[in-house]
Image (cartoon, helix red, strand yellow):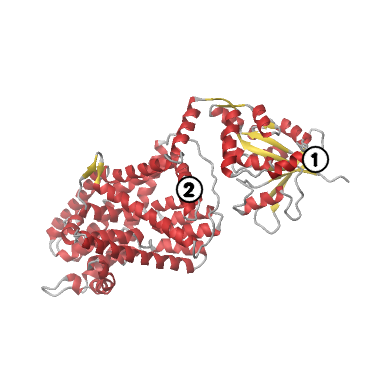
């Protein structure tokens, strides 16, 4: 009895392999797992024009035979005949995305260099035509040296021609030529260059829009220009956070102040009025006024994602991250941590290399999350002059930009150290699909901004509210004797005295020491804690309404304020972040290590900032 022939579908992820597999095999499929791994094995029966059945295997998507994940390892072993119990495929059906031809031709060269019978399915040709591309399959076939069949799997176009090509598939070269093929080992840059030439040679025409998109990629992904453009964009973002948000923040601050004045004028003095003015309005209100900055920051992030630029930023950062032992795959989780470290840490699940993933989790808290933005904005507005240092460049925005850069630099240096010590290993490769450029939809942006604004306000109404009220109670009781400071007499004052003994060497005053404790619940609580502390300490209704910014300007020295900013660049994230890190690492070992090294960095850099500023006479 003759053994049934086998064929395997290979190609990059998102090439349309699964759709092509379903179209070719219909309901004649079996799904199981490969022995010893959790990778799914999909096999079906393809009927050739002659009536001969062929077992068709849908292999996991792969970017290279240099396996970077369990999926890619399975593909490599099956194609090379090294997987136990799996027959060596007699025909390889290489599936390429016609709309993203250059990228897919990189892996195609590795497959064809094996010298095995190969047929190319130039899939999703309709999408390429929609994007303004007219391709020449014959020219591509000549360049690759194998048959190329245009297909549209979802519309069953080209399936009969593909089945005929599979039936005719034979070794395309003599044994000597095949041996020459297998001896060719092009480097990844060489394969990329060859892919570019082949894609260009197979393109008969392209629309003006496609040429525009290609031109944008030539500039935005340029080895020399790409990084400065990204840096300039980030600089503009943080200038806008201050310049654009100021009128709206002032309006919110005025509204909170007006409400506070109305409460003072309406309610009789006593516990309830103090709770509302000193606790709720002074505390929670001092955080809510930073909503405009949060909205502006996320507006830029959402536009970058929706336009297709975010993936290109990851590609640009790959070279920098490779130098510290990471890959561009870590960039998206780290950038997500700018919003919040919790989804950033959860996004590391897409990183196949366990050492890469662990390192990314450990450095994610160093990325400046949106919870730190109110702290930065408050202190900068209080101690940094609102002056310009150049055309359209404000000093406050420049300092904000420097703080974010400091967080990124800290994350990169920490990653370098971790990859050479506790998470030792080499950087993994990085290849990703570039999404098409498109104009962001205003409706989608509005929904995204509303969701993020609601999350911020919900935190203000839950975590920050509870922490602020608890602090107000600790600050208000027991009551001080006549002539005695309320803070000195309170439970919170006792706690502050103990913490202050630890942080006094790095320039922190007692109010700052007290703010650090509830800030572990949420970073924004540091702002509400300071506001509540100064409101309770004032003992005067007029001073209670005094803006927190003015309180800090009057009470803090510049070295002290700079030390506080340095602390928040490096200090650990909220308790929720630590809990998520424990879940993602399956234990407390690495979260405790993360908390320990971040606290050490925060203490050292805050102290260094303070004493350098003092020595400089600031």
* Residues tagged 1 and 2 counted as in contact (Cβ below 8 A): no
The tag on residue 53 is 1
Q: Residue furthest right?
A: 1
- Image point (41%, 41%), residue name: 304
Q: Nearer the viewer, mark 1 or mark 2?
A: 2
| Callout 1 secondary element | strand
Dot 1: within a 10 Å radius of its alpha carbon, few (fewer than 14), some, or many (20 or more) residues? some
Identify the image quadrant of residue 141.
top right
Any part of residue 27 in sight:
no
Q: Residue 598's x, y, as percent? A: 39, 64
Label whose residue precedes the other's in the sequence (1 or 2):
1
| Rendered-image quadrant of the C terminus | bottom left
Q: Closer to the camera, 131 or 105?
A: 105
Q: Residue 307's x, y, as percent? A: 44, 38
- Image point (51%, 57%), residue name: 357
Any part of residue 215 in sight:
yes
Q: Which residue is mark 2?
A: 319
Query: What is the number of callouts on the image?
Result: 2
Dot 2: within a 10 Å radius of its alpha carbon, few (fewer than 14), some, or many (20 or more) residues? some
150 horizontally vs 356: left or right: right
518 horizontally vs 358: left or right: left
Q: Closer to the camera, 223 or 313?
A: 223
290 horizontally vs 326: left or right: left
Identify the image quadrant of residue 177.
top right
In this rendering, is residue 434 above or below 506? above
- Image point (64%, 42%), residue name: 11
Q: Closer to the camera, 552 or 607?
A: 607
| Callout 2 secondary element | helix
Q: Residue 149's x, y, as percent? A: 68, 31
Identify the image quadrant of residue 564.
bottom left
Q: Residue 541's x, y, as percent? A: 13, 60
Q: CA distance from mark 1 to mark 2?
A: 47 Å
């Amino acid at each position: 009895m003759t053994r049934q022939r086998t064929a395997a579908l290979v190609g990059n992820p998102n090439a349309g392999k699964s759709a092509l597999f379903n179209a070719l095999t219909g309901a004649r499929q079996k799904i199981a797992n490969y022995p010893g791994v959790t990778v799914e094995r999909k096999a079906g029966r393809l009927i050739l024009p002659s009536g001969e059945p062929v077992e068709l295997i849908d292999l996991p998507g792969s970017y290279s035979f240099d396996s970077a994940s369990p999926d890619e390892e399975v593909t490599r072993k099956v194609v090379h005949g090294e997987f136990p119990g799996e027959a060596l495929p007699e025909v390889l059906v290489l599936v390429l995305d016609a709309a993203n031809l250059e990228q897919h031709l990189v892996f195609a060269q590795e497959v064809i260099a094996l010298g095995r019978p190969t047929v190319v399915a130039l899939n999703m040709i309709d999408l390429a035509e929609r994007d303004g591309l007219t391709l020449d399959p014959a020219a591509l076939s000549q360049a690759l040296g194998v048959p190329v069949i245009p297909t549209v799997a979802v519309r069953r176009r080209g399936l009969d021609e593909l089945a005929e090509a599979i039936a005719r598939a034979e070794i395309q070269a003599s044994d000597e030529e095949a041996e020459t093929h297998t001896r060719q080992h092009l480097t990844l840059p060489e394969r990329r260059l060859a892919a570019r030439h082949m894609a260009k040679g197979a393109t008969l025409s392209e629309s003006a829009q496609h040429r525009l998109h290609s031109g944008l990629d030539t500039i935005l992904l340029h080895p020399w220009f790409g990084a400065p453009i990204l840096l300039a964009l980030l600089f503009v973002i943080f200038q806008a956070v201050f310049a654009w948000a100021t009128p709206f923040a002032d309006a919110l601050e005025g509204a909170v102040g007006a409400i506070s004045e109305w409460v003072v004028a309406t309610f009789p003095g006593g516990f309830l009025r103090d709770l509302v003015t000193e606790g709720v309005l002074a505390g929670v209100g001092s955080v809510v006024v930073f909503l405009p900055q949060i909205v502006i920051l996320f507006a830029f992030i959402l536009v970058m994602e929706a336009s297709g630029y975010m993936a290109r930023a990851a590609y640009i950062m790959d070279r920098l991250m490779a130098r510290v032992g990471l890959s561009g795959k870590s960039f998206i989780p780290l950038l997500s941590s700018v919003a919040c470290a919790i989804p950033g840490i959860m996004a590391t699940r897409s990183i196949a290399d366990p050492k890469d993933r662990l390192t990314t989790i450990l450095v994610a808290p160093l990325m400046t999350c949106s919870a730190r933005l109110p702290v930065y904005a408050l202190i900068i507005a209080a101690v940094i002059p609102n002056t310009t240092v150049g055309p359209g460049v404000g000093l406050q925005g420049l300092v904000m930009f420097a703080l974010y850069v400091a967080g990124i630099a800290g994350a990169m240096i920490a990653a370098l150290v971790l990859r050479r010590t506790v998470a030792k290993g080499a950087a993994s490769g990085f290849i990703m699909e570039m999404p098409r450029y498109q104009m962001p939809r205003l409706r989608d942006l509005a929904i995204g901004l509303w969701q993020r604004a609601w999350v911020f306000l919900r935190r203000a109404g839950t975590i920050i509210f509870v922490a602020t009220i608890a602090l107000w109670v600790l600050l208000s009781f027991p009551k001080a004797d006549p002539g005695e400071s309320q803070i000195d007499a309170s439970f919170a004052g006792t706690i502050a005295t103990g913490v202050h003994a630890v942080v006094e060497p790095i320039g922190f005053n007692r109010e700052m020491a007290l703010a650090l404790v509830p800030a572990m619940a949420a970073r924004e609580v540091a702002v509400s804690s300071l506001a509540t502390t100064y409101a309770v300490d004032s003992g005067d209704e007029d001073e209670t309404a005094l803006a927190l910014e003015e309180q800090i300007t009057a009470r803090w020295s510049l070295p002290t304020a700079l030390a506080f900013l340095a602390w928040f660049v490096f200090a650990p994230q909220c308790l929720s972040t630590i809990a998520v890190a424990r879940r993602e690492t399956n234990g407390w070992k690495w979260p405790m290590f993360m908390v320990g090294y971040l606290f050490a960095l925060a203490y050292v850099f805050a102290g260094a900032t303070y004493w350098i500023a003092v020595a400089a006479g600031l």
